[in-house]
Image (cartoon, rainbow, N blue to C red):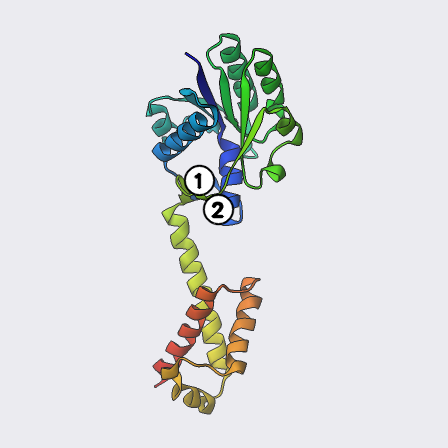
Amino acid sequence: MERVAVFVDAGYLFAAGTKELFGRQLKREDVSLNCIAIRDELRKAAEEYTGLDLLRIYWYDGAPPRPTPQHAELARLPNVKIRLGLINSQGEQKGVDSLIVTDMITLARNRAMASCMLLTGDEDIRVGVLLAQEYGVRVHLLGIKPAKGNQSNLLRQEADVIHVWESSELEAFLSKSSSLEFSELNRETDILLVVAQEVYDSISGERADELLSKTESKWLPSEIDGHLLSRARDVTGGDLDQGEKSRLREYFRELLKARG
């Protein structure tokens, strides 16, 4: 029976996936991975792309001296096999590329797979693609948007078919860890509250009383609103979104109400 094997470079998945979802690459400890969901998404994609049943999913990652709880959870799942390289002193994974290439060649030579789906961006995997193709294996390269910017051009040229995952697929299994979300919320809230307090302290008592009389309308004079937004931009290093603007204005109004 012809089957499809899946090869996953976890380093690429986390780096490109978090950048696409959150606008920046997050540290591993700040990311939550739903192991069952990623297994199911990979299987679904591989079978849909190739029309073949799954052989198994190979998950490649760098590891500290011993496997992490996440590695152990993945290893316990049916149809998932974990292959671990090393992590050097700079936090870079080592030995992962050679593991992927070795498995691709072995499965291709033994006719264990007719097609494979490869999730990576590393040019060093290109030799594995070429050799697997010589044994008749069709290679489906899966990238993460914007794949042209985070995958080797030479690797993309060698693939038989290219597919790209976007945020809608990534959201099914990647999210910020609860500790990171709590930290970001507290940090953001504190900054906006500090800005509101700073602007409030800069106005005279008479002006504050005048503004207090108008707080029920939730309207702020343009010079006050502009001062709030300008100061927030200076402190945060960028423009606030609509939700942040509303929260900043509400903080300011609450300070006025506390005066009364």
Give the residue number, with chain letter if any, for mark 1: 169
Asked if labels 1 and 2 touch by Cβ distance under 8 angstroms, the answer is: no
Which quarter of the figure is the C terminus placed in?
Answer: bottom left
Residue 53 vs 180, above or below: the answer is above
Determine the secondary structure under disc 2.
helix
Q: Residue furthest toward the top?
A: 110
Indicate the position of residue 33 as horizontal and vertical percent values: 39, 38
User: Amino acid under label 2?
Assistant: Leu
Camera-near label (2 vs 1) is: 1
Relative placement, left or right, of 227 versus 37 is right
The one of 90 and 230 positioned closer to us in this rendering: 230
Give the residue number, with chain letter if any, for mark 2: 21
Label 1 CA crowd tier, 10 Å (few <14, some 14–19, many 20+):
some
User: Amino acid under label 1?
Assistant: Glu
Label 2 CA crowd tier, 10 Å (few <14, some 14–19, many 20+):
some
> Which disc, if any, is residue 30?
none
Q: Earlier in the sequence, mark 2 or mark 1?
A: 2
The one of 58 and 130 positioned closer to us in this rendering: 130
Residue 60 vs 168, above or below: the answer is above
